[in-house]
Amino acid sequence: MNRFAFLLCIALLWGKLAHANKISDFYQIENVQSPELLLQRYGNSKGGQGTQADGLDFMPDGRLVACFVGGEVFTLNPKTEQWKLFADGLHTPLGVVALNDREIMVAQRPELTLLKDSDGDGVADEYSVFSDEFGISGNYHEFNFGPVRDKDGNFYVSLGTASSGADVRFEKRGKFDRRSYLQRMYASVPYRGWVCQVTKDGKFIPWASGLRTPNGLGFDLDGNLFVSDNQGDWVGTSKLHHIEKGKFYGHAASLIWKDDWKHGRPVDLAVPSLERMRETAAILFPHGSMANSPTQPVVDSTAGKFGPFAGQMLIGEMNKPRIIRIITEKVGGKIQGACLPFYDGNGLATGNNRLAFGPEGKTLWVAHSAHGWAGSRGIQKIKWKGETPPDLLSISLTRNGFSMRFTVPMNRDSVSNPDNFQTKLYTYKYHQGYGSPQVSKETRTPSMISVSEDAKSINLVFDEMTPRRVYEFSLGALSTAKGGKLVNSLVAYHAHNLRN
Amino acid sequence: MRSRILLFFKESGISLSLLFALLFFLPHAEAKKITVGVKPGLQYDPKLLHVQPGDQVELIFDNVDEMMHNFVLVEPGSRMEVVEAAIALGAEGPELHYVPKSDKVIVATPVVLPGKKVAVEFVAPKKEGEYPYVCTFPGHGFLMHGVLFVSKEPPKKVQSTVEDQEGEKSAWWEFENQGGAIVHRTFMPDSTPAAIAVHLPGGHSYCWDAGECRLRYAWRDGFIKKNGSFGRWRTLPTIEGRVYYQEVAFPFRPRGEEVTKVRFEGYRMIDGIPEFRYRLGDLKVSEYLVKLPGKSGLIRKFKILGSQDGILWSIDPDAGVSYEFDQGKKVSEGWLLTAKEAAKFQVRMEEISRKHPILRVGMNDLAVCYNRKGDLHPGAIGQSWMMRGGKPIVPAQQAGDFTNGASLSFWLKLTDSRRPLSNIVFWEKGGGLSYQPQANPFLFDAPVKPFARSLEGVFEAEDAKFKGPSRTKANGGFLGSGYVDFGSKKGEYLEWDIMIKQDGPYTLRFRYSSSGSRPLRLSVDGQEDLLAPPLPFSGTRSWDSWSNQDHMVDLKRGKRRIRLTSVSNNGPNIDRLEVAELKKGEEKLKSMELPVSNPAVDDQWHLLCLTLDEKTEKIYLDGALLANKPLKGDFPSGKIVLGGGKENPNYYLDELRAYERPLSKDEIMRLFDDRREVEK
């Protein structure tokens, strides 16, 4: 009897645990040993600060390429699991693209640099300037992000603005312009706050302006370029922009570097006139609840080897132990969509700065860093175990509401209850001030819900839809047909446009 | 099996003929056979050998390691020189098996591939001594070496001899220095932000500026301290060691042309040492720097392609090094190289002892010793630092040796030439330069009479806390660096925190200007005398005519907060607050006027130089001798410190240099001309 009760308890507990549906039940996370040399160089005392990693890619021969905060580029041989120093002494490298087994493109403070191992010994012996046609004022905050490479072989980098918490150096590289100087984040030398294209033959083309700290570039499967930006002045909450040539994305400082700029100090322009020039974001990440510093977007190009979210983008987050999923669609000619957590906690560290899928498509590699802000260090890898996590698969705007699809059949009662889909509507101010509270806040409940036959899709109808709003849903009350919870509950859709 | 045998030998122990000869091995009946292997971690096995003077030696070098090595036996005490000379071979190294042509080399093997062995036969030196052997393969020579004892008696205690040769290692860059150079891209002082710091094998370092495509400066005895964590790198690194070379401008130009446009193309590593590549106009240039073997200095190897009429190198007499070119000829403007010569030439730069300042602070940027935002201002040359009293500032510096004389040179700009400045720049031991508003305005190692001893203090309005009024210098006649202009709102205030040493009656004297009466209410520690009317601040003749508003008050010991608040929609201009203790029986402060006796300097930039030789102390103002006195006492010593004296008013400093020798009059004139150059 006792023994039976005990077994029953185990069974019940087991059932309960299974229904808690942790993301780590479906994905396995593993720490990657850091290069020994970094621990030797910088010591392990302060938690191995030198192992902060800021760039990941793979060579065709399968070697992982990673760059680190102290300026090192290492390769990791997948067979021997040995790290090898490929290049050294770079100035804050923040991204790598492996062009082949011997060449790596890296963005560092002074330039976009082509590292070449010309004799094939696995160590770079040539450090060639690929492009340096932008300014450096010496302000510590002028980070250079990227590079990423498009299908045609062209590169993109984004150039961070300077912090008003620090000055410029007396000697600078590039023309210095006081019209954008010390007013919050500033762009006193050329193309700060811009995304720039560097063609495959090295031609530098200023591509799009209006970015603040655009720490993360990536493409979707259609080759659209996305760049994240960090909450701060002019940026009410962190964003993901769909970048198109010639457009301005809202942070005023960079405008002085437009060819035809004749308006003096950008900060003196009235907000409405900036608003008219501005292209709005594709995705808004609610500050605090979703992300404070989103990083690099990377598309799940694994065609299902990494789980059910193929074709969607993943993006890291610095402040939280979180990787976020991005679901986009085109509405009224504009790419917009939703963000929701993909992997939260459960062994994941903070400072998720760079992401890359392994060549076999089953593993997502994550490089962690902090740079003096919130974050951590080292490299982790995440593998799908093969079971489908119960989660929101997709969300799409309809003419009068949203359709949602889940990865698993849902409990019909829970998805038919309008109270479970009460949505918070809000937006953010566009102004020079630092960040923005949520404004125009209201709450709406769907007037009608229809559920598909397979209980995986639902259609939410609202009496009224308002454009230019974030629609935030909390799906914590939903349960699956098997009685478990979804692994994530928060989703925020940025409905800039409505469907006609 | 030996595949080939190379024999290098030295004739008669004096002159050398280095022979790369392929010979058949002929066993020698009397040859002493020695085998040397390799242990992991760049070590010979064994590290010590012994032979008799004049022995016939057959040495087998068995490279059981995974890397390539050679074995080079050198003259006593010349290991580092040979190692550095091997590195200096650069691209020619592999061809010569990294064995430099030097009379210090006694015998050498070629580079031996991993797993191979080679034998050499030689006659041991006749002179007894400790002969180092070393692997001159790039990067190995600092670790991989041993000693051949040539002596009749076998040495007794030998094991520790080799191991103690390397000193303690502590700095982050030191343990790295096993391969080639350390190339570290980082922000560096006195460079554009696209700087490259390089630490060469042999211990010398330099800053190469990728923004301007040129060497900026070189130093010895260390590398850099990064002054930050992996945080936000707000602070510039400091140089650890002694700068002995500074390049003030681009060093050469195509003959007959003014080309300034440069384009950096990157660098490639040759045996672990960077070769920089760039374009100067249409010229294609590469520069490769190595340490000057056996001496303090650098060899710079250039390849300049595409010049039509050759290039002209300008020689800077103040650069701190002597130049020696292997090509070209001296002309009046500098050094001339034909197009053919420019295609491949080298410049040897050897440090001239004590030539370069032991300390030079350009003050164009903030530094780790002085990192207060807002204290950078336009300078005599570039930017300057505003010194605000407080703690003295000690720039990072190597200990100087001033026993052969000393000099200081700096640009100074006063904000109030009527007030003295004590210890503007000084040595920790042995005094500094001070200013007093008198006919002999600058003094060395002598106290200046502090300003108005009877006063508790003088407090500038422009340094005080205020809300509403604005800081300005629009109208003349103010003291200090400006004054405070009350605006058009009621309730604007200006507030000083002052220290009172003892309880008692005091006079508060406000220096002000006003058109018509513009009263302000006075409060002490937030308390105001509600019955008393506000202080009248009656009209002065004009806005640039200043008067004093006195007020007597009892003050308690400790920190007191004095505040003036506007009572209507206007107020006067306030220049400063003077606080004076009233002596017993004194009802009113009689005279507190400032000591003014025609100050010799105005509030513009002036170059001040002090030179000390064995006999005399000389002070120069703007290149002209101002004072010439016999030197009292010893030479100064210790670190150079800026800005002593809490009572000093604010002043600006620029381009500080400290030398371990007296400067010549010509050098002082050139320092003075630097500013004119900049102004042009």
Image (tube, coloured by chain):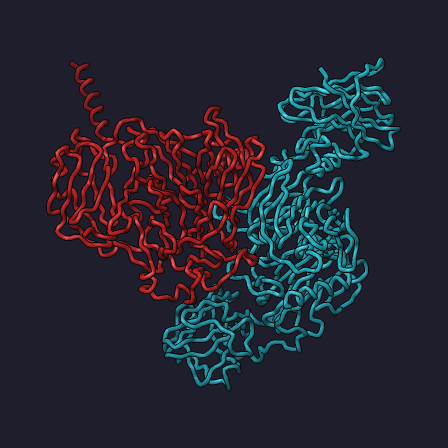
Chain colours: A red, B cyan
Q: Is residue B292 visible?
A: yes
Q: Which residue lies furthest to the front in this view?
A: B308
Q: Is residue B583 visible?
A: no
Give the total of numbered labels.
Answer: 0
Q: In the rendered view, does B169 fall on the left or right side of B511? A: right
Residue B178 in the image: above or below residue A245: above
x and y percent of residue B602 in the render?
64, 74
Q: In which quarter of the image is residue B441?
A: bottom right
Residue at x 69%, y 42% (from the top left corner): B290
Q: In the rendered view, does B443 fall on the left or right side of A205? A: right
Q: Residue furthest right?
A: B12
Residue A79 in the image: above or below residue B290: above
Residue at x 54%, y 46% (from the top left corner): A129
Nearest the viewer among B553 and B466 is: B466
Q: In the rendered view, does B243 fall on the left or right side of B582? A: right
Q: In which quarter of the image is residue B18?
A: top right
x and y percent of residue B214 in the render?
64, 51
Q: In which quarter of the image is residue A251?
A: bottom left
* Quadrant assignment for the N terminus of chain A: top left
x and y percent of residue B332 in the render?
78, 60
Residue A164 in the image: above or below residue B268: below
Nearest the viewer among B269 and A184 is: B269
x and y percent of residue B269 in the render?
61, 39
